[in-house]
């Protein structure tokens, strides 16, 4: 369901009590569905390395590891653990204190150019591969000023990343 869509009732059902109840029920259902999809909280890894596990607890298998500024969506909480979804839709669990509200992005293309300024006319400083994460420093129209955990700073086009 698209939360921005609007259902227009049939003209013959507006004037009846049953038609009004249908409209009201549909509206309430749409609001609940939209609120639940919008309530996903986005956090980022705040430490140099965090393990993503198969379940909430250190006794669960490590599925993969992620680096600083790796953005994730929180989909569930269990004690001190968050169930997360990443930019590729992969799901796992991360310990709560390893995540913070840090604006961050992650490269979703195979290889992207990180530039000196906010436009394609600016010099390419370096390239970043898919899965490289950055702290978001500034936005300028469709361009994002970012900083890698190693200190490198540059600009990326917003269509090349996920998480902003």
Image (cartoon, rainbow, N blue to C red):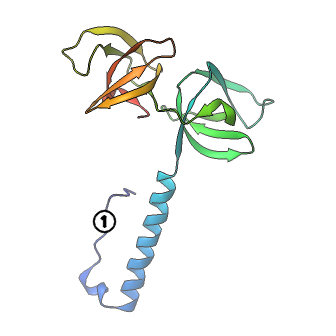
User: Which residue is painted at 50% across and 11% down in the image?
Assistant: 150
Residue identified by numbered label 1: 6
Q: Nearer the viewer, residue 91 or 157?
A: 157
Question: Where is 85 relative to 46, above or below?
Answer: below
Q: Pinpoint residue 39: horizontal percent, then vertical percent.
A: 51, 52
Q: Is residue 30 left or right of residue 5?
A: right
Question: Where is 60 relative to 131, above or below?
Answer: below
Question: Where is 86 relative to 113, above or below?
Answer: below
User: Which residue is painted at 25% across and 9% down in the image?
Assistant: 123
Q: Is residue 95 visible?
A: no
* The C terminus, quarter of image: top left
Q: Is residue 114 left or right of residue 54?
A: left
Quarter of the rendering containing residue 16: bottom left
Judged from the image, the secondary structure of the residue bearing numbered disc 1 is loop
Q: Is residue 117 left or right of residue 67?
A: left
Quarter of the rendering containing residue 2: bottom left
Q: Is residue 56 visible?
A: yes
């Amino acid at each position: 369901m698209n939360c921005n869509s609007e259902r227009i009732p049939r003209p013959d059902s507006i004037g009846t009590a049953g038609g009004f109840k249908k409209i009201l029920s549909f509206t309430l259902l749409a609001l609940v569905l939209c609120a639940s999809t919008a309530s996903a909280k986005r956090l980022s890894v705040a430490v140099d390395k965090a393990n993503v596990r198969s379940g909430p607890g250190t006794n669960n298998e490590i599925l993969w590891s992620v680096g600083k500024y790796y953005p994730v969506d929180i989909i569930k909480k269990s004690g001190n653990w968050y169930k997360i979804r990443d930019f590729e839709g992969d799901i796992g669990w991360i310990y709560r204190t390893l995540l913070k509200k840090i604006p961050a992005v992650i490269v979703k293309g195979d290889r992207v150019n990180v530039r000196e300024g906010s436009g394609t006319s600016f010099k390419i400083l370096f390239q970043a591969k898919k899965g490289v994460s950055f702290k978001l420093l500034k936005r300028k129209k469709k361009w994002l000023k970012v900083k890698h955990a190693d200190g490198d700073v540059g600009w990326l086009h917003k269509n090349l990343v996920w998480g902003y």
